[in-house]
Image (cartoon, rainbow, N blue to C red):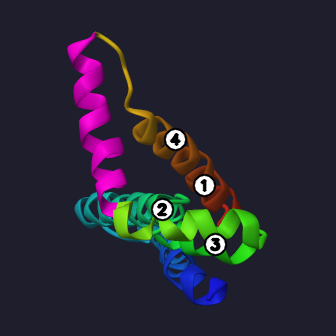
Amino acid sequence: MVWVALAGPATNIFLALVSAAQFHVVSYLPPDAALWLAANLRNAVVINVVLAVFNMLPIPPLDGGRVAVGLLPRPLAVPLARLEPFGMLILIGILILLPLAGSQFGLNLDVISAILRTVTGYVIQLLLVATGNA
């Protein structure tokens, strides 16, 4: 089950890696085409990395939750697996309601965006270094 859950994020990382590797082609194109291709490749890298990182959050309806349930010892995995019916509500609460409530009190409670921004930046940097584009 863990391998199946890892397939989606692994595919996103692979697509981001292929897109990052194609940046080497940009210098051989005419300027207008190079700008267009570079912008599209950048978008492909960012979108695929964000999808992979978000999908690996350890919340049960996401693949990261299934990986966590598969890797954790049984006493910890069972309570996490029981959260799956409420996973979408948890996601809505974390993604929408928590930041909305925080803004009412003048607090920044947008935890998921901060995590996504930080981890995504590191993964993109790693992909650029791996493909010789850093």
How far across and how far down the image is residue 51, in percent? 41, 64
Check whether the beta carbons of the residues at disc 1 and disc 2 lie within 8 A of each other.
Answer: yes
Mark 4 near mark 2, Cβ–Cβ under 8 Å?
no
Residue 76 visible within the image: yes
Distance Cα–Cα, label 4 vs label 2: 13 Å
- Mark 1 or mark 4, earlier in chain: 4
Give the extent of the magenta segment.
Answer: 88-105
Amino acid carrying mark 2 in the image: Val
Image location (x, y in percent) of residue 122 = 62, 47
Q: Amino acid at mark 1?
A: Val
> Looking at this view, is 73 or 123 the one in front?
73
User: The N terminus is located in which quarter?
Assistant: bottom right
Circle on res. 49: 2
Q: Residue at x 38, y 26 (%)?
A: 109
N-term-proximal mark, 1 vs 2: 2
Query: Callout 4: 10 Å neighbours few (<14), some, many (20+)?
Result: some
Q: Is residue 122 left or right of residue 97?
A: right
**For the residues marked 3 and 4, what is the alpha-carbon distance in whole angstroms?**
21 Å
Mark 3 or mark 4, which has the lower sequence index?
Answer: 3
Residue annotated with mark 3: 69
Q: Secondary structure at mark 1?
A: helix
In this figure, which residue is indicated by the disc labeled 1? 123
Quarter assignment of residue 102: top left
